Image (cartoon, grey):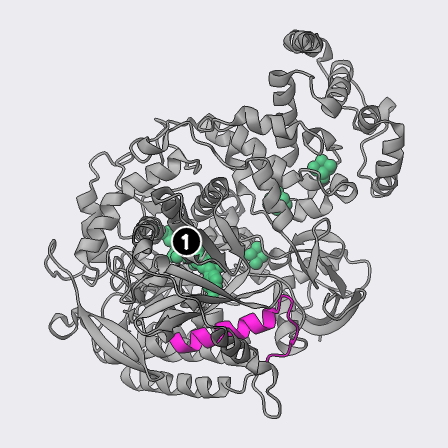
């Protein structure tokens, strides 16, 4: 195959923006997007809330500077401040650009783009399209890519980088429709494969495929991952599926109730009650569950989000989505019964370590979106900043790769490597005797992470987590792929995803064990305060001879000095 | 103990999923596999399929991603109707199921097969390209990002609902014309085309419309309403189809081939009755033979399911038809002129 100038792995917001921008930067380049699902199915579509930008349409006194400060403070001072500056100052431009190419933003009375308040922001600066912001952004980008004639390899599963010393020759991927392993020789590769929070499995709000494939591929190729221990939990996920019930339910007056019928938030946030900040509410619910005041069920212990006192009229008019979701996914009508909920893993702050241009340490390899870590979110992401991140840094990575592609000479990917991948991938089809079931391993991985590397972390639990993950990795060697066919083998794909999750889970647990402090989403019971002397730094996880080795990287400051984070 | 025949009080029961199977690599024809599993109240069809895949037969193949009804991956036919497996409650399906405690799961129709419940979505993407389903902005690329277009709430509302579409292809699977003609534009693509056409930021309205009025385009639709009845996001797809047609007549006149006959039929119907006489429309457009061959078998089925529009004599003139006729004549005057000048 003729080498590509730019291969983009991932067709979510980050990948599509990168593709669009790369084509714009140099239309003569040979650019392809590879995605394991049709791009419009990517998880970007699930974002409801919106994207932040200091347009000052709603709050006339809003400024980029205030957005910068909110982001740095929200991230508990772990974000790189020069990167945050790029994020926030590019924001108004990128939101307008999306508007210019057709995104159907909701409108204000003066016909400008509408904005609303969002957690952690001083002023209302979250731009939205009803409750389908991510969906409409993704549609717009996909439409524009079709218009520009971007070449898509849909339903291709990326497997590995072909590495030659300090350089990559390109990507190896499996065509799902035929089962063939194909080579994508490329001057540059951009990873935009989304987050890894699905490793918490049933305790995650993420799509089934948010398994951190790009991070795992980069990690195996020797590229460092940054701040992997930071995983954000959302307080109200549905019990069975982990799917999200938005903050709106509590905003309208919903109660959180334990099995003794008590509105327990009174114990944790006397004044704000159910409307305390996300991490606090998540921790409170978790405490109730841990101390035995939750409801037991085969699908796990949960507490109640009670809306029944709000009445049918209000629920129907203001919370129709939430009602629909409760009925569809729990079989519960919130007009009549409380909704069973518990905290759910929602967003991964960590990812492939990049500079402000999306470059990784390996020549010609870039990363952007939830898959990358610039870092703009630090220890905790603000609502509405992630969509912004994927757009801004997706564009930057696309631009940089297109500009730098000429610097790297292409090299063919050796046939032997394809053969090797083929054997590795299909190895599981031959296991017999005492084999393992992928479903069980996946479930156990989710449970051990939720229990030991969850909201509350503590030395002995984390040690146990590390231990259990390495046992699961051992058992994975005997996992069985039951479906032996070539055509659209989803069984095989799920097994490959599980492998990626296991590799990454190890870095999350290792990082969490090492970081002896509490910062942002990372709460250590045994080290309850932020330790700026020892831990005001990023962790870097690198794979050396098949093992996780932890390193560190300083935080770029320059705008705001360290302060205590209070709200 | 659960009382028999009292579904509402039951919290768990054994349900049989009768799953369509076909693997092109080994099977010469398709067949069904039965899987009986315990299902709790509140469980969706997708969760049941996941359970089957994890615990009974890992080779059962289907697509699923978000599991929250937003990505559009899991469209399939459940007891004969196209819908999203992830938002469909097993209990709800059983309540309407003809065979007790049996749920039949099949792939979507009108798209090429790949394996089991998986069909090929590429034809739909190709049609999105054919009908320019994107905004070609009136703003030059160099000035983008500097300022916003000002869009009124009224304009936003014109396409708000249409942008709910998640391209799940459920409507495509149920479309009656697509069964006869795979080249037909498809309801979802008509919807998307309409959404682009009513957006003031777009500059290729004419070009898109010119494509839409060609063969296999907007005039081929029989107004059977199945797409709209099926839509998993309750989008009024027919409004979009009517919108495109009105637009076509208004801005292009009746100068298009098959469309022109259809349009004349359409206009005379509106004028006479104030609403469409759907049942006679395909005959007048495509001729008696075509209608007999392509639509009659379907019409018989539709009548049995009481979906077909009433036969002509039953369609009563809409209220206020006199005023409407006057307005209509005025409105179409220029269309006829255009038609004449075109013939010269
Ligand atoms: C329920 C929910 C609500 C959210 N709400 C908001 C919000 O209101 N505001 C906000 O700012 N953020 C929100 N977020 C976060 C935000 O949606 C995501 O962080 C963001 O969309 C990620 O975009 P992405 O482009 O990086 O990745 P994704 O959209 O996840 O795309 C990843 C792409 O990579 C592809 N891919 C993955 N692995 C492979 C592989 N092995 N081979 C080939 N292709 C692969 C996939 O097919 C996909 O196309 C929310 C997240 C969730 C879960
Ligand atoms: S109304 Fe038209 S587009 Fe919709 S299903 Fe019927 S024929 Fe197809
Ligand atoms: S119009 Fe409705 S049914 Fe058709 S693809 Fe879109 S969401 Fe699905
Ligand atoms: S899995 Fe996404 S819509 Fe059903």
Q: Position of residue A361 (x, y in %)?
A: 26, 67
**Image quadrant of ligand 1?**
bottom left
Magenta residue span: A481-504
Disc 1 under 8 Å from ligand 1? The reply is yes
Q: Identify the residue shown where x is 66% and y is 52%.
A: B83
Decide if residue A239 is in sight here: yes
Based on the displayed image, in which of its 4 quarters is residue B338 positioned? top right
Whether residue A482 is in magenta: the answer is yes
Q: Identify the residue shown where x is 34% and y is 61%.
A: A409
- Mark 1 belongs to chain: A
Overall secondary structure of the magenta stretch?
A: helix
Whether residue B257 is in magenta: the answer is no
Q: Identify the residue shown where x is 44% and y is 36%.
A: A104
Image position of A292 with respect to B207: above or below: below
Nearest the eye: B77 or B188: B188
Q: Position of residue B258 (x, y in %)?
A: 75, 25
Label 1 CA crowd tier, 10 Å (few <14, some 14–19, many 20+): many
Nearest the eye: B252 or A263: B252
Q: Secondary structure at mark 1?
A: helix
Q: Position of residue B106 (x, y in %)?
A: 73, 59
Image position of A192 with respect to A53: above or below: below
Decide if residue A247 is in sight here: no
Judge from the rendering whether residue B64 lies leftward or rightward of residue B222; answer left or right.
Answer: left
Q: How many marks?
A: 1
Based on the displayed image, in which of its 4 quarters is residue A228 positioned? bottom left
List the residue tagged with mark 1.
A15
Looking at the image, which residue sits at the far bottom? A433
Based on the displayed image, in which of its 4 quarters is residue B192 positioned? top right
Judge from the rendering whether residue B72 lies leftward or rightward of residue B59; answer left or right.
Answer: left
């Amino acid at each position: 195959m003729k080498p590509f100038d730019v291969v983009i792995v991932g067709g979510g917001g980050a990948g599509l923006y990168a593709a669009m921008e790369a084509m714009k930067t140099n239309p003569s380049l040979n650019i392809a997007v590879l995605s394991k699902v049709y791009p419009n199915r990517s998880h970007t579509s699930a974002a409801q809330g919106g994207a932040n930008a200091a347009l000052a349409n709603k709050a006339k006194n809003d400024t980029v500077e205030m957005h910068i400060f909110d982001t740095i403070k929200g991230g508990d001072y772990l974000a790189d401040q020069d990167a945050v500056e790029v994020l926030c100052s590019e924001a108004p431009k990128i939101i307008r650009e999306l508007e210019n190419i057709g995104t159907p933003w909701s409108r204000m009375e003066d016909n400008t783009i509408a904005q609303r308040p969002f957690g952690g922001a001083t002023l209302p600066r979250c731009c939205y399209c009803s409750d389908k912001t991510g969906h409409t952004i993704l549609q717009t980008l996909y439409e524009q890519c079709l218009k520009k004639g971007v070449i898509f390899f849909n339903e291709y599963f990326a497997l590995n980088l072909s590495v030659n010393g300090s350089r990559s020759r390109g990507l190896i991927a499996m065509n799902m429709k035929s089962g063939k392993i194909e080579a994508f020789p490329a001057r540059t590769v951009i990873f935009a494969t989304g987050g890894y929070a699905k490793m918490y499995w049933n305790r995650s709000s993420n799509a089934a495929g948010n398994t951190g494939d790009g991070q795992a591929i980069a990690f195996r190729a020797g590229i460092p991952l940054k701040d992997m221990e930071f995983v954000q939990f959302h307080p109200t996920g549905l019990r069975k599926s982990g799917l999200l019930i938005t903050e709106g339910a509590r905003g309208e007056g919903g109660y959180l109730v334990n099995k003794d019928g008590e509105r327990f938030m009174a114990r944790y946030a006397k004044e704000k009650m159910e409307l305390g900040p996300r991490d606090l509410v998540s921790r409170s619910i978790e405490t109730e569950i841990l101390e035995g005041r939750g409801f037991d069920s085969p699908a796990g212990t949960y507490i109640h989000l009670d809306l029944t006192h709000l009445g049918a009229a209000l629920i129907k008019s203001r919370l129709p989505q939430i009602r629909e979701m409760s009925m569809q996914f729990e079989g519960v009508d919130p007009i009549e019964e409380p909704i069973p909920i518990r905290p759910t893993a929602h967003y991964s702050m960590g990812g492939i370590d990049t500079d402000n241009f999306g470059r990784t340490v390996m020549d010609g390899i870039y990363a952007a979106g939830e898959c990358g870590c610039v870092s703009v979110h630090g220890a905790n992401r603000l609502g509405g900043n992630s969509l912004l991140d994927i757009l801004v840094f997706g564009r930057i990575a696309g631009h940089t790769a297109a500009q730098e592609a000429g610097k790297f000479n292409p090299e063919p990917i050796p046939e032997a490597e394809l053969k090797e991948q083929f054997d590795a991938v299909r190895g599981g089809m031959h296991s017999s005797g005492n084999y393992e079931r992928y479903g069980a391993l996946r479930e156990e991985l989710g449970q051990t992470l939720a229990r030991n590397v969850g909201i509350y972390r503590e030395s002995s639990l984390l040690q146990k987590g590390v231990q259990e993950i390495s046992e699961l990795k051992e058992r994975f060697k005997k996992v069985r792929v039951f479906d032996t066919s070539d055509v659209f083998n989803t069984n095989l794909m799920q097994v490959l995803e599980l492998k990626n999750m296991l590799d990454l889970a190890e870095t999350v647990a290792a990082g969490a064990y090492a970081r002896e402090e509490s910062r942002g989403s990372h709460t250590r019971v045994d080290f309850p305060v932020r330790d700026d002397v020892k831990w005001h730094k990023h962790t870097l996880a690198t794979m050396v001879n098949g093992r996780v080795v932890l390193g560190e990287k300083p935080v770029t400051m320059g705008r705001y000095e360290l302060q205590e984070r209070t709200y | 103990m659960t009382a028999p025949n009292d579904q509402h009080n039951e919290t768990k029961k054994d349900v049989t999923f009768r799953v369509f199977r076909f693997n092109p690599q080994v099977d010469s024809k398709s067949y069904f596999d039965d899987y009986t599993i315990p299902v709790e109240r509140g469980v969706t069809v997708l969760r049941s399929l996941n359970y089957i895949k994890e615990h009974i037969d890992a080779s059962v193949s289907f697509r699923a991603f978000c599991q929250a009804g937003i990505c559009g991956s899991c469209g399939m036919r459940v007891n004969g109707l196209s819908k999203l497996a992830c938002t469909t409650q097993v209990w709800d399906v059983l309540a309407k199921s003809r065979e007790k405690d049996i749920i039949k799961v099949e792939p979507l129709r009108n798209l090429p097969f790949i394996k089991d419940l998986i069909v090929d979505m590429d034809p739909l993407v190709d049609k999105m390209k054919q009908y320019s389903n994107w905004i070609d902005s009136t703003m030059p690329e160099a000035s983008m990002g500097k300022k916003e277009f000002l869009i009124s709430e009224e304009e936003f509302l014109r396409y708000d609902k249409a942008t709910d579409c998640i391209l799940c292809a459920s409507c495509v699977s149920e479309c009656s014309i697509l069964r006869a003609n795979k080249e037909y534009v498809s309801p979802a693509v008509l919807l998307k085309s309409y959404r682009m056409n009513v957006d003031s930021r777009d500059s290729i309205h004419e070009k898109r419309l010119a494509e839409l009025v060609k063969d296999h385009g907007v005039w081929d639709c029989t107004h059977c309403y199945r797409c709209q009845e099926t839509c998993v996001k309750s989008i009024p797809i027919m409004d979009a189809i009517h919108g495109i047609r009105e637009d076509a007549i208004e801005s292009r006149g009746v100068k298009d081939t098959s469309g022109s006959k259809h349009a004349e039929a359409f206009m005379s119907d509106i004028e006479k009755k104030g609403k469409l006489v759907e049942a006679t429309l395909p005959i007048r457009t495509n001729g008696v033979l075509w209608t007999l061959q392509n639509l009659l078998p379907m019409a018989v089925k539709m009548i049995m399911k009481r979906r077909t529009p009433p036969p002509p004599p039953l369609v009563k003139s809409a209220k206020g038809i006199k005023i409407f006729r006057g307005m209509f004549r005025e409105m179409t005057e220029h269309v006829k002129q255009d038609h004449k000048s075109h013939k010269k």
